[in-house]
Every structure is written in structure tokens, then in C-alpha cells.
Image (cartoon, rainbow, N blue to C red):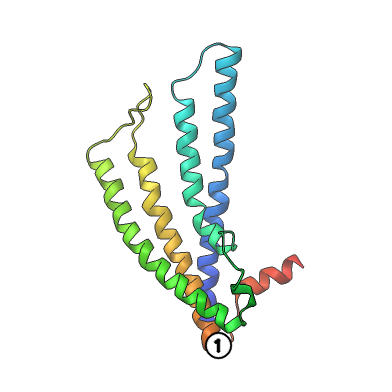
């Protein structure tokens, strides 16, 4: 069971690292928008890139935070019935949801790879402003984020399968809960 625990610990660590690293984009958004406001309203010299760059940063932040959010149970869940179920039935529901999620995300991943590759192969640029930045870097974050979300879904699927089977294991989350208590 130590290999399972190690896998869960590594995957959770990856999602946490990506979440923390991605959170720094918030400062980038604040910096760009602050600069834009000062340039526009104080210096009377608006930028051609401020709005678009902040939108790109926000898009990357939103999608890359998905695996971190899943790892910390931050996604919306309709749990009116779920929380009334016994723990094993909850685990079975989780098993089904994460298995279906992985299937859907796998299709989405393939589409996202094609989307990003096409953007890169044609040298796609934005037409939203005079700045015209290349779009492939921001589009490349989509398959990256979906891949990370698939990996975290797989970890959650493993947890659910172990709970359904009634297998006791060392969940790294238990260590975290005791550290914060």
C-alpha cells in the first residue's frame, strides 16, 4: 500500500505546486491592470497590450488552478443527497463521477492538443488589439491544464476505489488534517 500512498502524495504535491505557482499570476494581473490604469488616467497614454495580457493571465490562472481546486474539494458539488449517503455509497458515487470525468477530459485533452498545435503550426496571432501577441502560448496551457486535471482525477479515482473496496490506506490528506488541527 506504500506505493499507492506514494503515488497519492506525489500527485497531490504536483497539484499543490501548480496551484501555488499559478497563484502568482494574480500579481501579474494586478500589476498589468495597475499599470494600465495609471497609464490611461494619469499619464493619458493607454497601452495597447494591458487588457489583452491581463485576460491571458486570467485565462491561464483559471484553467491551471483546476487540479489544485479538485485536490482541495473546491469545485461545486450538489451534495443534498450525497451527504446523506453512507461513506461507502459516497465513495461509489465518487468512483463513477471521476471515471466519467476522466473519459470526458480525455476527449477534451485530445481536442485541446489539436487546438494548441494548430495555433502553433500556423503562427496564430491575436486580432483583438494592435499588439497582436502570439496565441499558441496561452492555447498551450489548455492541454497542460486538462492533463493535470486528468492526473488529479485519477488520484481521486484511486481514493474512491479503495474506499469502495473497504481497503485501509494511508491517505496523505489525513496527515495534512492532523497538521492543521
Seen at 50% across and 55% down, the residue is 66
Q: Residues within 10 Å of mark 1 (few under 14, many from 20)?
A: few
- Direction from residue 180 to residue 28 in the image, left or right: left
- Asked which secondary structure carries label 1, the reply is loop
Q: Position of residue 153 (x, y in %)?
A: 46, 67
Q: Relative to 16, does residue 139 appear above or below in the rendering? A: above
Q: Residue 178's image quarter?
A: bottom right
**Direction front: furthest residue:** 81
Q: Position of residue 136 (x, y in %)?
A: 33, 40
- Numbered label tally: 1
Seen at 37% across and 64% down, the residue is 104
**Direction top: furthest residue:** 44
Q: Relative to 45, does residue 93 appear above or below in the rendering? A: below
Seen at 60% across and 62% down, the residue is 72
- Direction from residue 43 to residue 63 in the image, left or right: left
Residue 15 visible in the picture:
yes
Q: Relative to 59, does residue 83 appear above or below in the rendering? A: below
Q: Position of residue 125 (x, y in %)?
A: 31, 32
Q: Which residue is mark 1?
A: 167
Seen at 55% across and 35% down, the residue is 29
- Direction from residue 19 to residue 130 in the image, left or right: left
Q: Position of residue 117 (x, y in %)?
A: 27, 47
Amino acid at each position: 500500500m506504500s506505493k499507492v500512498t506514494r503515488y497519492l502524495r506525489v500527485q497531490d504535491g504536483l497539484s499543490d505546486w501548480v496551484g501555488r505557482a499559478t497563484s502568482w499570476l494574480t500579481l501579474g494581473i494586478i500589476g498589468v491592470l495597475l499599470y494600465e490604469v495609471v497609464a490611461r488616467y494619469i499619464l493619458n497614454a493607454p497601452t495597447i497590450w494591458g487588457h489583452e495580457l491581463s485576460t491571458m493571465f486570467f485565462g491561464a490562472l483559471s484553467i491551471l488552478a483546476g487540479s489544485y481546486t479538485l485536490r482541495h474539494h473546491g469545485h461545486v458539488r450538489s451534495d443534498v443527497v450525497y451527504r446523506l449517503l453512507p461513506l461507502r455509497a459516497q465513495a461509489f458515487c465518487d468512483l463513477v463521477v471521476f471515471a466519467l470525468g476522466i473519459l470526458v477530459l480525455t476527449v477534451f485533452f485530445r481536442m485541446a492538443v489539436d487546438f494548441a498545435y494548430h495555433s502553433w503550426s500556423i503562427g496564430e496571432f491575436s486580432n483583438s488589439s494592435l499588439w497582436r501577441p502570439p496565441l499558441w502560448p496561452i492555447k498551450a496551457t489548455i492541454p497542460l491544464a486538462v492533463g493535470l486535471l486528468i492526473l488529479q482525477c485519477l488520484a481521486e479515482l484511486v481514493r474512491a476505489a479503495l474506499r469502495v473496496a473497504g481497503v485501509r490506506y494511508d491517505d496523505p490528506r489525513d496527515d495534512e488534517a492532523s497538521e492543521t488541527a
